[in-house]
Amino acid sequence: MTGSNTVTGNTAELTGFAALGITGALLKATHGAGFTEPKPIQTQAIPPQMEGRDIFGIAQTGSGKTAAFALPILSKIIALGTKRRAKTTRALILAPTRELAVQIEDTIKILAKGAHVSTALVLGGVSRFNQVKKVAPGVDILIATPGRLTDLVREGDLILSDTKWLVLDEGDRMLDMGFINDVKRIAKATAPDRQTVLFSATMPNEIAELAKGLLKNPIRVEVAPQSTAAAEIVQGVVFARTKQKRQVLSTMLADAAMKSVIIFSRTKHGADRVTKDLERDGFKAAVIHGNKSQNARQKALNDFREGSVRILVATDIAARGIDVPGISHVVNFDLPDEAESYVHRIGRTGRNGMEGIAITLCDPSENSKLRQVERIIRSKLPIVADHLGSPDPVRNPAEKNERFEPANDRNDRNGRRDGRRPGGQNNGFGKKRFGDKPAFAGAGERKPEGAKPFKGNNKRRFGGKRPAARAA
Ligand SMILES: Nc1ncnc2c1ncn2[C@@H]1O[C@H](COP(=O)(O)OP(=O)(O)OP(=O)(O)O)[C@@H](O)[C@H]1O
Ligand SMILES: [Mg+2]
């Protein structure tokens, strides 16, 4: 059997996860999850984490980074036993989107099956009350998006001083402009002797510099150069003018080989329009973007995961980390603003050794974005079709009079902001969020859902006095 102890002569030789230091109930649950042989990132990143080292981990999409950070933490927490202080968490995992946080908790529950490790989720868009209740007795592992977490800490509902493990999943996203201030503040509130690990498939140089401020003497574990796409993904580009893209997409989707497809759109409005056009063309599709309610977002993803819809139209909110085994195709209806997003988008297919196809529709106006993508992936995308010489399709006159309600696209920045409400809107209290200095245009407008207004010192940090006066 693979991944278990083998006895050679008199010496017990450990292999698989056991050789990485995973033992007992955790090893049993890991095998139970179908993880018998560790993936390269797991083999390389688990042992130094077990020794307490900080990790700067880079490995391709779908290569097993979740277990690479979850198993060492679980192993240490199990060894500690169950004593916890109220309102604290021993480990904190930060993720850029709510759906990814939910998925990480699910994975941890599977890996920790039978090991009595408590987990909780703190994320926006759903009941805050239930989250506060869940963390009140103290938890072992908290998985969170930064906005709602900041809110809970600020209000004194969560204390991070006992937090000895901090994980930044999708680390480059967590350290980019949309999240950096929250993440720095959160990290500062954790135990000074904490262990910090960061994982991603991409890592632009300027973000790697920022990471140095959070990691102590980290070990760099790089399974492949950053932005390397998984070898199993067959990539190609289709040149088509914007007006041709709908027809091109519908023609492609008529092929039964496109069993399970995720279509990425740069904007929420675009995602809604693509979904509506697909419906008009006879395709049923679920849609996920930041202007949908959290219930609708999670339902769309669950329906797609369970196979009750074969097409999911998404903004970049679903580009990072989402693991739906068996996605056969990724279609980029348009190119993303940030080249790194391309790597994450196409990485929804070709996961865990499976095959996948990624097709990018490119209008001539997107050529410079295409070149940027080709630069970071260090290869040229093969051209699979070129429709530029063909005329635009004639639009069905019946559709001309249909009114299309666009989603509010203001500040639609690739789901970067955790799907929070568009900047500038407030929850009716009209107050700016504490301590936020705009780091880029629009950054200061960010506000976690459910955030209470704060009067007084705009520079207040977690440690300060709680606001005396609050609007109801
Ligand atoms: N050792 C293993 N054996 C078998 N399957 C595994 C193993 N490790 C991970 N997997 C599976 O591989 C898939 C991808 O893992 P995971 O989501 O952790 O990838 P990732 O590297 O975090 O990708 P991304 O960059 O997209 O977030 C999951 O379905 C997971 O269950
Ligand atoms: Mg991941």
Image: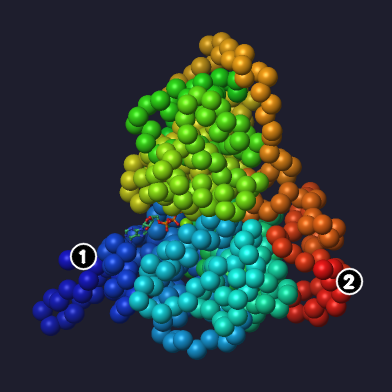
At horizontal 13% and vertical 76% (from top left) the residue drawn is 8
The number of numbered badges drawn on the structure is 2
- In the rendered image, residue 301, in percent from the top left (x then y), is placed at 49, 49
**Residue extending farthest right:** 456
Residue of label 2: 456
Q: Quadrant of the C terminus?
A: bottom right
Q: Quadrant of ligand 1?
A: bottom left
- Identify the secondary structure beneath mark 1: loop
Task: Give whichever of 424, 210 is nearer the camera.
Answer: 424
Q: Is residue 79 left or right of residue 340?
A: left
Quick one: label 2 or label 1, which is nearer the N terminus?
1
- In the rendered image, residue 97, in percent from the top left (x then y), is placed at 58, 56
Task: Give whichever of 31, 233 is nearer the camera.
Answer: 31
- In the rendered image, residue 80, in percent from the top left (x then y), is placed at 45, 86
At horizontal 69% and vertical 33% (from top left) the residue drawn is 405
At horizontal 60% and vertical 45% (from top left) the residue drawn is 289
The quadrant in which residue 143 appears is bottom right
Way the structure is coloured: rainbow
- In the rendered image, residue 231, in percent from the top left (x then y), is placed at 37, 43
Residue of label 1: 2
Residue 447 seen by the camera: yes
**Amino acid at circle 2:** Gly
The relative height of residue 216 versus residue 255 in the rendered view (above or below) is below
